[in-house]
Image: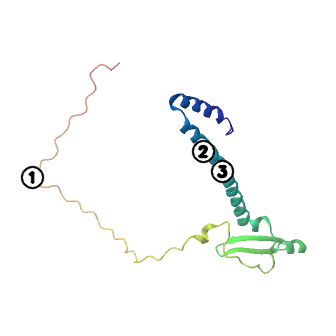
Amino acid sequence: MGWSGMGRTLDRTRARVNCDRGGRDVRRMIRHRRRMAHRAAPFRLLLALLLSVQWAGALAHCLFPWGLAPLAAAGGGHAVEICSAEGLHMVLLGEDGQPQAPAGPRHGTCPLCPGGAAPSPEAPAALAEPVRYAAAAFAPPPAGLPPAPPRAPPQQPRAPPLA
């Protein structure tokens, strides 16, 4: 039946529906679902392949260092890629750790950093006004009202505890 164990469930469903109302529609629907599942497999494979190609293209500068790395290996140094706000910089370092040659060509943006795709923030339209603090003024109580009456101290509970 296929579908990794779903055949038994489909057979039971088919038998149950066959007893109820003929089952032609349900059989047709089951066949249609199976065909659609088989048609979706090539599209899933194509999608996985395209995503893999995109991933490999984005990381190509890390996976295949063809830039100044062979020159660095021949001269006994190291090629270092630095991702900055201006883009990728390739620096050739000598054995002492100091830059050996001028920096290689700069790329527009680093493919691993999406910061270059974000738009820069706009300047505020109007300047904010300075904050001014005012002293709180408390109004005296209105004349003619009596002060609050005195209260008795709280009483202790006198009932038996609830069980």
Q: Which quadrant holds the N terminus?
A: top right
Q: Residue furthest left?
A: 144
Q: Is residue 92 above or below residue 9?
A: below
- For the C terminus, which image quadrant? top left
Mark 3 touches mark 1? (CB < 8 Å): no
Q: Quadrant of residue 91?
A: bottom right
* Pair 3/1: label in front: 3
- Where in the figure is residue 45, as x and y percent of width and height? 70, 54
> CA gap, disc 2 to disc 3?
10 Å
Which one is nearer the viewer's eye here, 108 or 12? 12
Q: Which residue is mark 1?
A: 144
Which label lies toward us, 2 or 3?
2
Which amino acid type is marked by label 2? Answer: His
Looking at marks 2 and 1 on the same chain, the residue that comes earlier in the sequence is marked by 2
Label 3 packing within 10 angstroms: few (<14), some (14-19), many (20+): few
Label annotation for residue 39: 3
